[in-house]
Image (cartoon, rainbow, N blue to C red):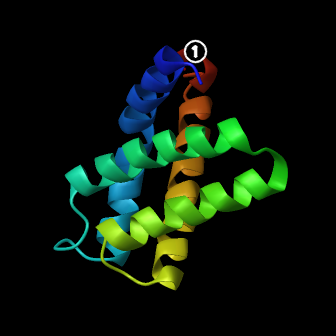
């Protein structure tokens, strides 16, 4: 594990993923349950724990465990059930995809941002 790489990944993920996760959480879990600081904690812990899992495991086992970790973090911080956590994750991914497409259409390359 490269500490500098993980720190950079945390910073970039907080900037890019946390707002999208927060929006999906507010829409589906409610304004009282989905706070922006919760989304930041989900992203930070998700990146750190995912990196630890990735250091020891690989392939679909690591991906499945990482998915379960992210869903557990969403469930815990947004105070919802497993199914709603999954829906929040899917909606966040869809919102992110729409943002990427819009940025690409207006000529802003995402690869240049990362």
Location of residue 55 with respect to 95 vertically, above or below = above
Residue occupying the point 67% across, 36% down? 55
Residue at the left extreme, as displayed:
32
* Residue nearest the observer in this picture, 17 or 108: 17
Residue 60 placement (x, y as % from top left)? 82, 55
Location of residue 59 with respect to 106 vertically, above or below = below
Q: Locate the C terminus and report the quarter of the image it occupies.
A: top right
- The secondary structure type at the circle numbered 1 is helix
Residue occupying the point 23% across, 53% down? 36
* Residue nearest the observer in this picture, 67 or 18: 67
Q: Sort mark 1 into few (<14), some (14-19) or many (20+) by Cα contacts within 10 Å.
A: few
Q: Is residue 73 rendered to the left or right of residue 65?
A: left
Q: Is residue 28 rendered to the left or right of residue 108?
A: left
Q: Quadrant of residue 90?
A: bottom right
Residue 50 placement (x, y as % from top left)? 57, 45
* Residue nearest the observer in this picture, 76 or 83: 76
* Residue nearest the observer in this picture, 105 or 25: 25
Q: Is residue 27 rendered to the left or right of residue 53?
A: left
Residue occupying the point 31% across, 49% down? 41
Q: Locate the N terminus and report the quarter of the image it occupies.
A: top right
Q: Quadrant of residue 102?
A: top right
The residue under label 1 is 112
Residue 57 placement (x, y as % from top left)? 75, 45
Residue 113 placement (x, y as % from top left)? 51, 19
Location of residue 56 with respect to 25 vertically, above or below = above
Location of residue 113 with respect to 77 vertically, above or below = above
């Amino acid at each position: 594990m490269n500490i500098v790489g993980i720190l950079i990944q945390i910073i970039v993920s907080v900037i890019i993923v946390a707002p999208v996760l927060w929006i999906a959480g507010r829409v589906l879990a409610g304004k009282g349950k989905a706070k922006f600081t919760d989304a930041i904690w989900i992203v930070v812990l998700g990146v750190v724990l995912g990196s630890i899992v990735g250091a020891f495991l690989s392939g679909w086992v690591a991906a499945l465990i990482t998915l379960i970790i992210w869903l557990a973090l969403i469930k815990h911080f947004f105070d919802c059930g497993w199914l709603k956590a999954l829906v929040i994750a899917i909606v966040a991914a869809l919102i992110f995809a729409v943002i990427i497409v819009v940025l690409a259409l207006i000529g802003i390359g995402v690869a240049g941002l990362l």
